[in-house]
Image: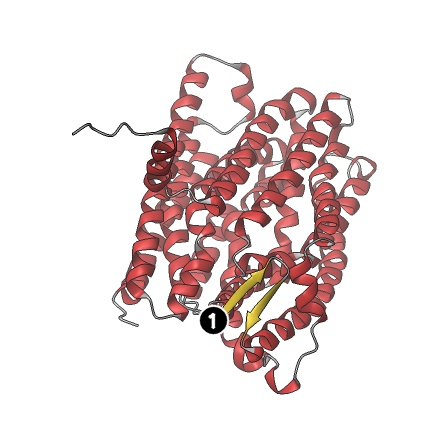
Amino acid sequence: MHEQIPTGASRLARLRRATGLDFHVLVTLLSRSWNVIAGATTVIVLPLRLDSTQQGYYYTITSLLGLQILFELGLGQVIIQLVGHEVAHLEGADEAKFAGDPTRLDRLSSLMQLLRRWYMVAALLFGLAAGVAGCVFLARRGDLPPAQWLGIWIIMVASTAVNLMYVPALAMLEGCGRIGQVARLRMMQSIIGYCGLWLGLILGAGLWSAVMVPLASAVSTGLWLRRAHLYDWLLRRVVDPANRIAWRRDVLPFQARIAISAMSGYFLFYAFTPLIFANRGAVEAGRFGIAMTIFNALSAVGTSWVYAKTPAMAMHIARGERKELNQTFFGIFKRSLIFTVSAAAGVVVCASLLDWAGVPQMTRIASPGVLACLALVCSCNCVVFSLAAYMRAHREEPMHGVSVTGAVATTLVAYFGSRVGMLPMSAMYAALTAFVMLPWTILLFQRYWRRTQ
């Protein structure tokens, strides 16, 4: 009996099983990996084309744009979960429509129509509120005259408001299982935006180059959605009034809790740079901003496996398939954690070696000690994000207590710690994440893991 020699196709199949890379995971991973490459390239190019003060303004402005979280109120995550639970009982007839229970189709359509109106209002409110608040904040420090940043800020706020308006369309498509298609769009718009940013920096456009990333995203998403026939079909369906989604009954209980977590997210991940900008100036804000950008990008890549399978987990729960749910989750969670810990450690080692070698550009980024603290935060957050995704797939939000406590504590750490120094502040942030938020999340997760239905 001759031993069968593995073919290229069989080797590829084994590799895909080992890594858990189906189309949706692979494209999501590629998209987020590109963001790491883009972030790393930006970290290199920015110090060469901007001075320390301009670099600080760049990272402060991008952090302030994160205020959109306060207006989105976590509805993006709510949409993915609600849509996933409805789609679990429908059949995907083709890329342009679903077939099945008319009641569930009506619920989907009414949800999209409702959220489209809400996000238009939210985008307008964000544009007005963030535009004015950002102008006041940036002018207060006065390291650069308004003539050098005011026009940039207005364009970036307007572009971000347009992107906020598109959130329900993209979240709906992801909830319908089109994770890979949406990830492909995000990768393409990111490539266009960052290439525009780098080209502008090289050509001497300075801070004006920063407008390219949100502007490219707004334009490309608008053009892409014109060909998203499924979304258009759901919006245009005539809905039986008896089958409409009831906001108070079907959306508000879940959304109210997740909104608290979503708003807390701004203070957990975006408050550091503006507070450092206010307390220590643009230069220190820029150094810490680069470090946060690196680890946030690594975190996004590391959680790609879990994020891509979120709709699938919601569908397993809707069908009562607990065994399949847990098998899916632990397979992707293991891969996410291995990647994140390895990558975060690699960043710290590389930065330490470059700092030891005396590379001049290392003065524009946070010290190796600060990077080590952020690497620990990044690794712990991989666990927190993954377990939270599992729990939220049940259309429940148990993380609001963790999020609010973490947000308040993180803001206090950022405000008072930045007055003392970057390393003490980072050490307190790491301790908070590792010894409070992580154990608390694990305790919450155990209740869901023990469920039988």
Left-right relation of 31 to 140: left
Helix, strand or loop at label 1? It is loop
Residue type at numbered disc 1: His
Q: Nearer the viewer, residue 260 or 356?
A: 260
Left-right relation of 352 to 284: left
Which quarter of the figure is the N terminus placed in?
top left
Left-right relation of 18 to 301: left
Which quarter of the figure is the C terminus placed in?
bottom left
Q: Nearer the viewer, residue 13 or 167?
A: 13
Residue at image location 69% in from the left, 68% down from the top? 235
Residue at image location 58% in from the left, 76% down from the top? 107
Residue 262: x, y in percent?
A: 53, 60
Residue 415: x, y in percent?
A: 52, 47
**Circle 1 is placed at which residue position?**
89
Residue 449: x, y in percent?
A: 28, 63
Residue at image location 80% in from the left, 35% down from the top? 148
> In this view, which residue lies farthest toward the left?
1
